[in-house]
Amino acid sequence: MHHSLPFYGRHQSSFLRIYMMLAPLVRVPLLGNAVRAVANSYARRQHGGFALKSGEAEQIIDAAGWVAIGECACRKVFHNCDSPLEAEIVVGFGKDVYADAEHKFREVGKDEAKTLVKRCKEAGLMSIMMQCKGHYYAICNCCRCCCVPYRLKSRYGINHSIVRDDHIVQNFVCQLNNHIDP
């Protein structure tokens, strides 16, 4: 695993605040296009999300060797709504980062995680597979008012903060099969 994910995990709240603090720079004349280009490149190469279609979150959970549930980082930081806070599902490389007591994620069975996905979908939340340097680490079930990747894309035109990949499940499974992922 690349060292970026543990660093991000230790400072997640700060990163989310910084992303949202810097995003309005895309609207500054003469500077905005360059900021947007850098932000899109960062989202593509460093840290971004993949929108999941119905059923894909469950397939990822079924493939994962370890699953834990905790609080949605975006909602915990921004408090823009009263959607359920316990909505983030750690899988894959996330185990190495979020399994410690500091993050307050609890290991659960796959059925409990899939039930959470269903409840979140019924609450109108969207499922997003998060990656850091190509390492998949969590499925966040977030709202449109708190979700940092969604707001970066919809409000600031940072389109690579959330993208669609029809092969996301296969890519995750490939990491597992190659023993890259715990």
Image (tube, rainbow, N blue to C red):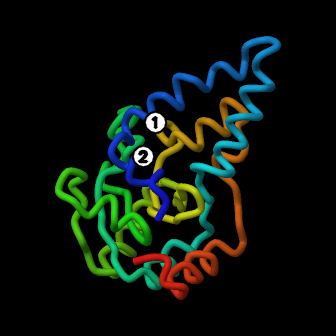
- For residue 50, above or below residue 36: below
- For residue 88, above or below residue 54: above
Depth order, front residue of 10/152: 10
Q: Which mark is on residue 16?
A: 1
From the top left corner, tell me how far across and down residue 140 is, in percent: 45, 57
Q: Quadrant of residue 100?
A: bottom left
Depth order, front residue of 142/13: 13
Label count reads 2
Q: Quadrant of residue 5?
A: bottom left
Cβ atoms under marks 1 and 2 closer than 8 Å = no
Q: Write the residue at 67% across / 39% down.
A: 153
Q: Write the residue at 66% across / 19% down.
A: 25
Depth order, front residue of 94/4: 4
Q: Which mark is on residue 65?
A: none
- Which residue sits furthest left? 101
Q: Amino acid at mark 1?
A: Leu
Precedes in sequence: disc 1 or disc 2: 2
From the top left corner, tell me how far across and down residue 38 is, in percent: 72, 34
Left or right: 26, with 148 as reference point: right
Q: Quadrant of residue 115?
A: bottom left
Quadrant housing the C terminus: bottom left
From the top left corner, tell me how far across and down residue 52 is, in percent: 60, 65
Left or right: 49, with 31 as reference point: left
Left or right: 37, with 132 as reference point: right
Name the residue tied to disc 2. Answer: 8
Q: Amino acid at mark 2?
A: Tyr
Element at label 2: helix
Q: Distance from label 1 to label 2 (Cα)?
A: 10 Å
